[in-house]
Amino acid sequence: MTRIIAFLIAAMPGLAFAAGGMSTTPPTPTETTEQCQEGFVFDTETQACVAIQQDSRLEGDRAYELVRELAYADRFEDAQMILATMDQTDDRVQTYWGFTHRKLGDMDKSMAAYYAALVTNPDNILVRSYMGQAYVEMGAMEMAQAQLTEIRARGGRESWPEKSLAWAIQNGKGSSY
C-alpha cells in the first residue's frame, strides 16, 4: 500500500495535497470525516458530531486543518461553512475559497477569490498554482504559463506549487489537490 501511495505521489504531484496545504501527505482523517455527516464536525468535548455553526472552537489552526481535511474528502460545502467564519482578509482563506469554488465548478467565484488572495499577498505561490490550474481547466494555457513563471520568479522553484502547475500544464488538466 505504501508503495502505491509513493508511486501516485511521484506520478501526479498534486494528488497528495488538499487546498491550501503545503504538506506532502494527505490530511489524517479524523472523526469529522470518518463519523460525521455533511454539515457536522466532531466535538471532542462532547464526543459527538455537532453542526458546524455550533462549534465555537473552529478557529486558527484547527479551522485550517478542518477545511483542508473536508476539502480532501470532497466536502467542499462544509469547508466553505467553516471558511465563512474565518478572517476573510487572510490570503489563505481566500486561497481555500478559490479552491473550493473551483472544485464545485464555479470558476467566476474561484478566480475572484484567487485574485483577492493575490491582492493581499502577491507572493502566495500556492494560490498562483491553483489559479494556474484553473486557467488550465479553462483552456487558457498562456495565463497558466504566466502563473508558473510568477511562481518561479517568487522563489518557488522545485516547490509543490511549481511542480503541480507544471504537471497540469503538461497534461492539460488541473490536479485533484
Image (cartoon, rainbow, N blue to C red):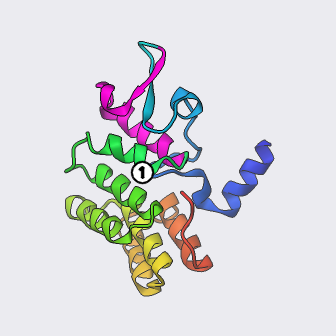
Most common secondary structure along the magenta stretch: helix
Q: Is residue 8 above or below residue 47?
A: below
Residue 51 percent coordinates (x, y): 38, 29
- Residue 28, placed above or below residue 125: above
Q: Amino acid at mark 1?
A: Gly
Disc 1 designates what residue? Answer: 20
Residue at 37% x, 61% y: name it.
127
Image coords of residue 85 (percent x, y): 26, 39
Q: What is the crowding at mark 1: few (fewer than 14 residues within 10 Å), some, or many (at least 20)? A: many
In the figure, 116 relative to 33: above or below? below
Q: Which residue appears farthest toward the top when viewing the image?
A: 46
Q: Residue 165 location in percent, x, y? A: 51, 69
**The magenta stretch spans which residues?**
47-72
Q: Quadrant of residue 131 in the image?
A: bottom left
Residue 105 visible here: yes
Q: Is residue 68 magenta?
A: yes
Decide which of 49, 25 is in the foreground and name it: 49
